[in-house]
């Protein structure tokens, strides 16, 4: 009896773990010669969700660090943008699909993450980046 070997890139597994019940996931299998395993194709995650347009316009990149500091509440937050457009917040194992959900995880309050999160280094908020994108597309 032949042996069937299926190897998935870790990025594929991560994508499947984050898929919701409404997502359609397509898996394609092809027959190989069996002599030697074919080299796995690099799966490049496609940005989706609220940050996708900013990422596609190169205003925001995977690996970008976002921060905030609320002086009165003495709270700070740090998140990293993932390749698929989510935010990984320090201290949380699961990525968040939107800036506001990520901010809420840190503050414990419903809050506008677009105006709260700042790009580390230049200080622009996600809202400023969104307005930059709008001005590009309206020209």
Image: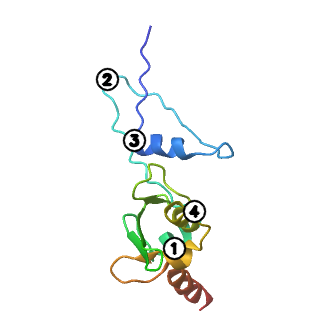
Q: Dot 2, crowdedness within 10 Å: few (<14), some or many (≥20)?
A: few
Element type at marker 1?
helix
Q: Position of residue 10 (x, y in %)?
A: 39, 41
Q: Position of residue 11 (x, y in %)?
A: 42, 46
On residue 10, the disc is 3
What residue is at 55 percent from the left and 37 percent from the top? 27
Q: Dot 1, crowdedness within 10 Å: few (<14), some or many (≥20)?
A: some
Instruction: Give the camera-side residue of 56 and 90.
Output: 90
Q: CA distance from mark 1 to mark 2?
A: 44 Å
On residue 101, the disc is 4
Element type at marker 3?
helix
Q: CA distance from mark 1 to mark 3?
A: 25 Å
Which numbered mark, 4 or 2, is in the foreground of this view?
4
- When the figure is inspected, residue 73 is found, relative to residue 81, above or below; the finding is below
- When the figure is inspected, residue 4 is found, relative to residue 112, above or below; the finding is above
Write down the residue under mark 2. 35
Q: CA distance from mark 1 to mark 4?
A: 17 Å
């Amino acid at each position: 009896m032949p042996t069937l070997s299926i190897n998935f890139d870790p990025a594929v597994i991560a994508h499947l773990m984050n898929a919701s019940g409404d997502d359609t996931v397509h898996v394609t299998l092809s027959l190989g010669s069996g002599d030697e395993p074919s080299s796995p194709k690099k799966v490049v995650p496609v940005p989706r969700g609220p940050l996708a347009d900013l990422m596609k316009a190169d205003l925001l990149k995977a690996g970008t660090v976002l921060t905030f500091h609320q002086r009165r509440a003495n709270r700070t937050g740090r998140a990293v943008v993932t390749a698929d457009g989510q935010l990984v917040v320090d201290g949380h194992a699961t990525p968040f699909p939107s800036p506001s959900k990520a901010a809420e995880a840190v503050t414990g309050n419903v809050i506008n993450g677009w105006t709260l999160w700042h790009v580390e280094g230049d200080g622009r908020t996600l809202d400023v980046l969104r307005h930059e994108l709008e001005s590009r597309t309206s020209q």
